[in-house]
Image: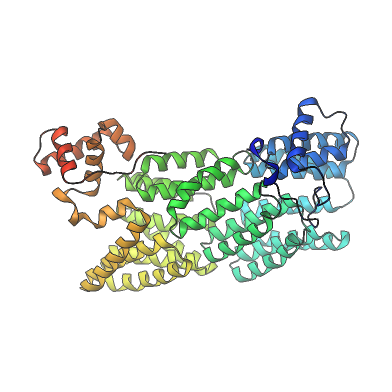
Amino acid sequence: MTEALHPDDVTVLPVNVNVNVDAGDSATLVERLDAARSSAREGTANLPLDELRHLAEDAWWLGDSATSMALDEEVYRRLEADQQLDEAARQALDLGLQWVTRGDVVIGTAWLGRARRLLEGLPESVTHGYLTYVDATYELDVHGDPAAAQQAAARLEALGRTHDDSALRCFARVLEAFAHVREGRTAEGFQALDEAMLEVITGGVPPRWAGDIHCTVIHVTHQLGDWARMRSWTDALERWALPLSRTFMYATVTRVHQLELVGAEGGWDEVLAEMEGPSRALVGSHGWLAGAGFQELGDVLRCRGRWADAAHAYRRARELGIDPQPGEALLAHAAGRSGEAATALRAAADGVGPLERARLLLPSVEVGLACGDVDLAESAAAELASTAKIYDTAGLRAWARHAEGLLALSRDEFEDAEVALESALRDYRSQRLRYAVARAHDHLSTARRGMGKDRAADADAATALMIYRELGAAPDVARLTVSERPGGLTGREAEVLALVAGGAGNREVAQRLVISEKTVGRHLANIFAKLDVGSRTAAAAWAHEHGIQGLPQGRG
């Protein structure tokens, strides 16, 4: 990526940022990166320690994590050899953070272990505070114990006062905030985060750690289904990252988060056009977010009916350490494998906390009802209602009421379904979730038709169809326009026929639609019977005559 940069692409960093680039530098960052690479190739034995540090940091700013980390490891070796143990431990912590961020947790954990070993027996220092912060965030993520996080926050606050260190005070507020969120005190948690970010904005936190805080906060808002807060924090990340350098890794991170929001708001064309680029660029430097980008790409492709492409995107996400659920399960469900989808959703929910499970629960209700697994549907709906009550965000409330509405529909309790779905619709609208709004209208149509409110049901169905068409949600459009399809074909039969008319054999059709060849054969038999034709050639001619064509193409 960086070899193609032009010096004009580099923004000189503001002087209040704690890095070694300021407005008086005559060399550009690109020239410094070239020097870093040259030094790494020729050997670093003769370079002074400070120069090594500068070169490593320059490479990091330009997104060349391989060069940066190689130089950082050389800095660590020199510090340890010179028995500068506290500084070596701090360097090990920085390396641990970078390895974990890029997705290599095992290596990152090993570096954190080195830092812990070096600090044993040393007087308490700022570096001990960094280690406390890392340990506490790990414990909170794995065990979800807010009390332990609060204790660590108190220790960091005391260390921050003793050493007059703004980063430790920021870490204390961050831990306090996440502890509050875990306790269901969401508003208090975000108030503490607002205070913590004052230190980030003013340059009081080293950039690598500041970027990690930004991403962690955005990830939590995403888990909470709090799209309004996610927008605010993504805007904050953009204000922090973009003025520093357009080649800065976190400028690319910002774009992935922005595209996640664009996708939620219905800008699917923009997601399909752009998401793969920044996601690929982050592989090797910010692995889990690269995986999240491919997961979002897969979700849009799935909703567009490009199932083979969606499966490919989900595989890329999984390779990068992201479990792409509920997307993979919903893909199996769309292909008629609802039992398989239910099993996948149960497995994904096993061993993760309530916030991590929240996104799986509404799909679990939908899939459970579709395959007759009522226990899955009812337990998922109950847990979602409980989670929404604890955290009380608009997204969680909407998911919970939507799940309640689906259960009511399954029992023909149409009045209860209408009330629940209307509530979900209001929250979806407030969060600007375009596809979710369409789905709520879609299900409201069923509820109102069951109540005999045919005009209202028609209006809901028309609204859902209009949004689906705007989004390009081909499977949903096909499902709602079945009466307009010639020959009485189902949506899946029309998809099979369109591919056959385009010259695809049974194996290719199966691969494109993520179904078995046996299922393709069964669909073709039904198609031949409905159209009263006896061959693929005759069926293809009928398809061209009646305009059944233009099925979304494969991965481009």
In the image, farthest residue toward the left: 532
Q: Where is residue 192 in the image (x, y as percent from the top left)?
A: 69, 67
- The N terminus sits in image quarter: top right
Question: Residue 474 at what x, y percent from top left?
Answer: 32, 51
Which one is in front, 149 or 204? 204
Give residue 237's quadrant in the image. Answer: bottom right
Residue at left offset 8%, top offset 40%: 532
- Where residue 244 sits: x, y (%)? 71, 53
Q: Residue furthest top?
A: 42
Tell me if I can see residue 381 in this picture.
Answer: yes
Image quadrant assignment for residue 101: top right
543 displayed left or right of 433: left
Coloring scheme of the render?
rainbow
Tell me, yes or no, if residue 120 can be seen here.
no
Q: Where is 205 relative to 89, above or below?
A: below
Number of numbered tags placed on the structure image = 0
The quarter in which the C terminus is drawn is top left
Q: State the image coordinates of residue 508 (x, y, percent, origin top left).
A: 30, 32
In the picture, measured across the screen, residue 305 lies left or right of residue 390, that is: left
On the rendered structure, is 455 left or right of 241?
left
Identified at 26% across, 54% down, the residue is: 479
Q: Quadrant of residue 312?
A: top left
Q: Pick the residue in front: 190 or 70.
A: 70
